[in-house]
Image (cartoon, rainbow, N blue to C red):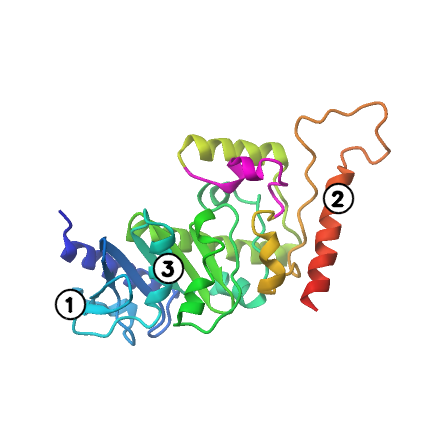
Amino acid sequence: MINAHKIKLDICDIGQRIYNKGFAAANDGNITVRIGDNEVLCTPTMHSKGFLKPDDICTIDMTGKQIAGRRKRSSEALLHLEIYKQRPEIKSVVHCHPPHATAFAVAREPIPQCVLPEVEVFLGDVPITKYETPGGQAFADTIIPFVSKCNVIILANHGTVSFGEDVEKAYWWTEILDAYCRILMLSRQLGKVNYLDEQKSRELLELKDKWGFSDPRLTDEYKNCDICANDIFRETWSSSGVERRAFEAPPVMQPAAAPATSGDSPGNGIDEERLIKLITDQVMARLQSK
């Protein structure tokens, strides 16, 4: 049996944590937990997430209509509801504005892959949506191309939304992402970001599979992708205004099982076909963004 009061306490705890971390200034952010087929607990609008009490939490249905609570529900609840509709197994959604991840949202800079082991295991490729004015269904629809393939999404010029089987897990992905974005920025200031090679990256994917974490790169659809080149979401970059500027593309990955032969060209270790594809993709993305 679901203990709604306990879940409300958990929501208040996460609200305080995102406020204390600086992820939700003033009245920013919103949190929901699905407690039934047609019932979702939702934080109120115009109320600081750092000072929530259980009776501040309202209840809405899957259309967004408020069915209980003394405070008006968040204006961005439709975004949460769309995630629940697309991923019925998801039980909680957290939206906030963590500063380092939101900087990537404003710059529309793709998040580099194959840098930190923990990020590869827990997050994988992180997409950036196209921008829409927050609050309406059009805004909620921006997550549809991505939500089935990840557990955290960057909302262009806005913030982040993450989701999981409970409110604690939903929050974790945001905290991991913001810490990673901060590390990337600091590393870039020091000079460069060094990438893991394909062999080490595939070892992490094997661990991820062993531990029960899903990743599109483990599916047949992406079995031949360049696992560190943001291949999963690259096709949406032009429509979202995403372009590499601050962080260069990772080195083209040489297939792990490809041995050198006597007929190799002087540029040993370079996969020419992948290099041509990478350059072509970047040129086309720039042309389409103009």
Which quarter of the image is occupied by the C terminus? Answer: bottom right
Q: Measured from the top left, where is residue 253 in percent x and y?
A: 68, 38
Labelled disc at residue 55? 1
> Which sits earlier in the primary sequence, circle 1 or circle 3?
1
Report which residue position mark 3 lands on: 82
Q: Residues within 10 Å of mark 2 (few under 14, many from 20)?
A: some
Q: Measured from the top left, where is residue 258 in percent x and y?
A: 71, 27
**Magenta: predominant secondary structure element?**
loop
Q: Residues within 10 Å of mark 3 (few under 14, many from 20)?
A: many
Q: Residue at x 50, y 45 (%)?
A: 124
Q: Residue furthest front?
A: 63
Whether residue 216 is in magenta: the answer is yes
Q: CA distance from mark 1 to mark 3?
A: 25 Å
Report which residue position mark 2 lands on: 275
Q: Residue at x 37, y 51 (%)?
A: 172
Mark 2 residue element: helix
Residue 60 left/right relative to 118: left
Q: Residue at x 40, y 33 (%)?
A: 211
